[in-house]
Image (cartoon, grey):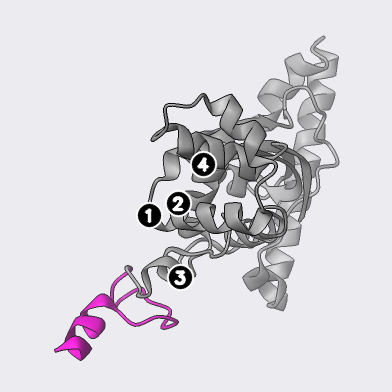
Amino acid sequence: MEVKLIEMSSNPEEIIYSAARQCYSEKDAYDIFVKAKNIEKKKIEKFIDEIVKSGHESVLEHVKFTFAISGISRALTHQLVRHRVASYSQQSQRYVNMENFKYIVPPSIKKDEILSEIFEETMEFIKNSYKKLIERYKEIGMVGEEANQDARYILPNSAETKIVVTMNCRELLHFFKVRCCSRAQWEIRQLAYKILEICKEKLPSVFKKGAKCEYLGYCPEGEKFTCGKYPLKKELIKNDR
């Protein structure tokens, strides 16, 4: 899995600062933005930190990040696109020939010899079947996207894909709160932490934490699903008595 930052909003702190100030000021946001460049960076970062803590997250929507992501499965992107406040551009299995598709192997399969053998045999069978479909389509006069669009129906969820993702800061915070949790599926959790690492480096005033429990100070998942990193809410209430 590889995650690369293509682009992010320039002057992100000043954008967030001016947007937040605009809500309570008679001044024009552009003037606030220009003057913000002369304010000490630490003061703006502290201001943004308070904004995030207060839950005034709408002002974070004005700053966005765009990532190029590769080496992930279709199983992951099926989950990823459920985060609807975002923009996606994914490699097409209609326009791209998938005869030699790569695939992602889950860790639980990798570590077991029998599971690995079954998985690898299945992938090879699918590859060969895909090639046979493409060959037959050629025989009946169908080539390129016309053949690919139907042959792809046999491709597995494990097929490797590439995708460009753009999210604003508010949606990224939500993404991390949900997908950095131990309950999240392993692959999308791995992706979330890779993106979080970049965001923390580029905009630390906004991105300090990951999963929801880190913000709450307790696990909201309940006794059946907790990983134990944080206490359950009922335990906190019990200890306060």
Q: Does 224 sit left or right of 209 as displayed?
A: left
Residue drawn at the location 77% of the way across and 45% of the way down: 5
Q: CA distance from mark 2 to mark 3?
A: 17 Å
Compare residues 43 and 198 and report the one nearer the observer. Answer: 43
The answer to whether mark 4 and mark 3 are in CB contact below 8 A is no
Indicate the quadrant containing the N terminus: top left, top right, bottom left or bottom right: bottom right
Q: Amino acid at mark 3?
A: Glu
Give the class, few, some or many, for how many residues have Cα within 10 Å of label 4's Cα (few <14, many ≥20).
Answer: many
Q: Position of residue 19 (x, y in %)?
A: 51, 34
Mark 1 and 4 residues: CB-CB less than 8 Å, in contact? no
The residue singled out by tag 2 in the image is 51
Decide which of 62, 216 is in the foreground and name it.
62
| Disc marking residue 178 | none
Number of marks present in the image shown: 4
Tell me what residue is drawn at x 21 percent, y 90 percent: 239
Horizontal side, residue 123 vs residue 29: left or right: right
Residue 176 lies, in percent from the top left, at: 53, 56
- Residue 142 sits above or below residue 163 on the image: above
Amino acid type shown at disc 1: Ser
Magenta stretch bounds: 221-241
Q: Closer to the camera: disc 2 or disc 3?
A: 2
Residue type at mark 4 is Leu
Corner quadrant of residue 219: bottom left
Compared with residue 8, is residue 120 higher up or lower down, i.e. above or below? below
Q: Secondary structure at mark 2?
A: helix
How far apart are the alpha carbons under marks 4 and 3?
19 Å
Element on which disc 3 rests: helix
